[in-house]
Image (cartoon, grey):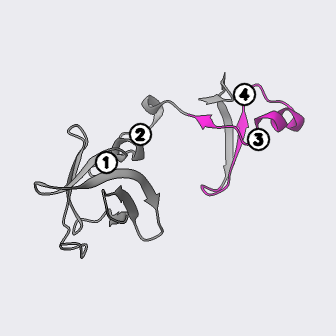
Amino acid sequence: MTVAGVEREIVRRSGTDASPILRLSGIEVREALDPLRGQELRVPRSALPPLEEDEYWAEELVGCAVRDGEREVGEVQRLLDYPSCDLLEVRREGADVLLVPLVRDAVRGIDVEARVIDVDLEFLGEA
């Protein structure tokens, strides 16, 4: 992984998932951490476990065309992380933003390679 552009290794991890505490290679004193505060910690995708079925990386969904069958709906602007489920924020021409919950009733299918998400506008109260 890299922190502030420097390759580092996690030597020790403690704390919780919500508030992890990491000890990084090459950092021996607490004062050496000050310049790293707020910096991105980047991990190569190859180091991550494979996704399960029906799991997607947010950046794979952003920019996807959203359709209801053959009807064009809009384009995914971002993925919102809500407590009950993730939501797709869909920008539509001449209409308000549409929030689509990532649940089977609302989303019929996701084809990441084709960059298309098929939704059920009737379920969403938009038909």
Please name the amino acid that badge 4 sits on: Ser
Disc 3 marks which amino acid? Answer: Arg
Q: Which residue is mark 2?
A: 49
| Number of the front mark, 1 or 3 | 3
Q: Residue at x 40, y 62 (%)?
A: 86
Q: CA distance from mark 3 to mark 4?
A: 16 Å
Residue 53 is situated, as x and y percent measured from the top left of the image, at 26, 49
Q: Quick one: label 1 or label 4, which is nearer the N terminus?
A: 4
Of mark 1 and mark 3, the one earlier in the sequence is: 3
First of labels 3, 2 by sequence position: 3
Q: Name the mark on residue 25.
A: 4
Task: Please give the residue where the numbered disc 3 appears in the rendered image.
Answer: 37
The reply, left or right, for residue 73 in relation to residue 37 is left
Which percent across, then down, holds residue 20?
Answer: 66, 50
Q: Dot 1, crowdedness within 10 Å: few (<14), some or many (≥20)?
A: few
Q: Are marks 4 and 2 in contact (CB under 8 Å)?
A: no
The residue lying toward the viewer, choosing from 109 and 50, is 109
Find out whether residue 30 is within the magenta segment.
Answer: yes
Percent x, y of residue 48: 45, 37
